[in-house]
Amino acid sequence: MASKKVHVSRRNESIAGYAFLSPFFLLFAAFGLAPILFTVYVSFFNWDLLGTQEWVGLANYQELFADTRFYSALGNTISIFLLSSVPQLICALLLAIVLNSKKLKLRTFWRAVILFPFITSTVAVAVVFGAMFADHGGMMNWGLQLLGLQPVMWHADGLPGQIVIALMVNWRWTGYNTLIFLAALQSIPAELYEAAEVDGASKVSQFFNITIPQIRPTIFFTIVTSTIGGLQIFAEPFQFGGGNYSGGASGQFRTITLFMFDQAFGQLHLGYSSAIAIGLSIIIAVVVGINFFISNKLVKGDK
Amino acid sequence: MVFTITCNHGAGAPPLNKVISNEGKQMNKVAKVSIAAAMVLGVVAGTGAVAAPAQAAQNITLTFGDWGDMGFKDLFAQYHKLHPNITIVEKSSEYNAHHQGLLTALASGKGNDINGIEGSWMPYFVQYPSKFLDLRKYGGSALAKNYLSWRWNPAVAKDGTILGLPTDVGGMAVAYRTDLFKAAGLPSDPAGVSALWAKTGWDGYVAIAKQYTEKTGKKFADSTQGIFSGIVAQNPTQYYDNKGNLIYASNKLVKSAWDTTVAIAPYSGSAAVFSTEWNAAIANGDAASVLAPAWMLTMIKGIAPKTAGDWNVATVPGGGGNWGGSWVTVAKSTAHPAEAAAFVEWLLAPAQQKTIFLTKGNLPSAVAALNDPAVTGYKDAFFQDAPVGKIYGSSAASLKPAVLGPKSASIATSFQNAAATVAQGKASGAAAWSAAIAEIQKNVGPSK
């Protein structure tokens, strides 16, 4: 009798537990899982959204593997990702250290200011950057010409366009990552630094031997989130290209998400677009996996 | 009596009100009557009398999805004055976002009651008449004769469904800066400028462009994309033949438009039409001429208000054509089909199209409005009193524009991008052509 009672109450408990958890799972199922499964489903069809779905099996994936545009978009995406994430995270960490310094005056003010770019609309950012980096009559080319240099065709050339897009991303996200780093820095016990001071360790040595190991999980977090964000970059190249899905006249800054969106709503190839989406998620999973593997190694190597 | 008129409109009696659609003066009368009715109703409702519930039941809000400025804003308010129980709420977004939103809305059977559809999207939507209210059920068939047939027909589906009524016509001309032409030693009066290429066509235009750029170091044309779109729009066939087969690679007219565009490229800007940089070029005088459908004049006024009085309008090389123009449609999902259809009919009736032309510059597609003396005699002060009504109006009636297909817009985009790479000096004409054909083939399939 007694054991049965315990069993029942445990069961009730677990039902209650699941009930409390259910809002998340229900929302995730509706807005996360269902669209993902539907994307997989659609990728096996030819579909123009209003018409009927025509089963084509794996043809969309075959087309994707053979499509040079996919590989060039992948290259552009990785290039923009590296141009943005690497300098961005380094700058964010350095800024966080400055903001964490007790010598800094008006600390709260600076901490608030650094988040301003993050709350600015991407479209507004893109319009301003687009004007600053205009091929003809832009402020940057005006400056370059003052210095006696050749103007750069930001919109027409490949790498310069990608650099401008990376700058836009950095301008927006550096402050955000700075605050995340700052929170991590503040959780490092002051005793560690005091002990290091007593032992005569230099500031640089403190940075590499205390700061970096202590905030390693946070570094990993920022790398993963900026990888996921960086590989899905859309609004900046879209706006920089004049609201065109082509990503520049010769697709020189066409990213994978831009390519995916063009196929969906420019060409109305919803099936092919879904195949691109699945391809992109696999790529992101692989890159995040590599990140995880490397970070794991580093942590273990430390011990 | 007064009261009944308003009621009939609101309750969705057959909305074909010839009084409203045809005769401006009588419309005013109706307006006054409706306002009077509203006042009466207001008083009655205020005193808590019987009429109040009846009125409440008829209050209707119609949502109207459009992009940018289609020129309708003032008319929404005017319609509300005529029909106090009907309120039009505009849901405006950016061009692409609007059409994509419409796609998903129609697919899910929800969304705005009324939607604008731009010319290059219509060939796609017209394949799916079941998503739209068939205006034949609301007297639409009788309206066909009021509009230019080539503006009417593309919104009629294969099964005969009338999806929407046409807005404006994008007949073409060349807008140019008289001050810049003068400074470059070119004629600056419209007759003189038109004569520069009256006999030689696009070859003459290319020669003048070369002369201008060599003398001033500045670009003559605004955008290779615009030039290409304009020349293609003059052709009797574009990317589809009359049976609907793709002929983008084999059509000699497309290749010839391409070759002309490539010839103009060194003397033309490369930015996409409507991009920030294109806007700046127009405002700063970095382009001496713009290939301009009637709606383009409105664009120029909006982006370069400081250049008022610097422009004039000449005839276009190569003959008439149509670039742009839209339709207004009613979604099948609307809860108020009769009211929505009545409103669309009123909105695009000749009297309203005339108002839009005189206030916004969009050229009417309604024949009565096109022939209206106020339209044909209209001169635009921004363009040095150019007789724009005459320039655009006279060509619109005789146009026989090409048939567009569901993928026309996609094909045009690829060609325009390729033309931009030539203007940017990134590719030769031949290489860019091959790149465009390869891209188009991937997107829409092979050409016949």
Image: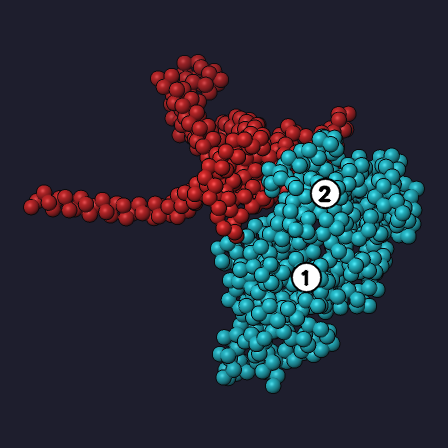
The residue nearer to you, when weighing B342 against B402, is: B402
N-terminal of the two: label 1 or label 2?
1
Q: Where is residue A94 shown, x and y percent of the image?
A: 52, 26
Which labelled disc corresponds to residue B152? Answer: 1
- Tell me which chain appears red: A
Badge 1 and badge 2 in a common chain: yes
Q: The residue under label 2 is which amino acid type?
A: Asn
Q: Is B435 displayed left or right of B264 in the figure? A: left
- Does any portion of residue B398 appear in the rendered image? yes
Q: Residue at x 53, y 59 (%)?
A: B131
Q: How many marks?
A: 2
Q: The residue under label 1 is which amino acid type?
A: Trp
The residue nearer to you, when weighing B444 against A207, is: B444
Q: Where is residue B389 shown, x and y percent of the image?
A: 81, 61
Q: Residue at x 16, y 46 (%)?
A: A9
Give the distance between the C-alpha atoms of the residues marked 1 and 2, in whole angstroms.
26 Å
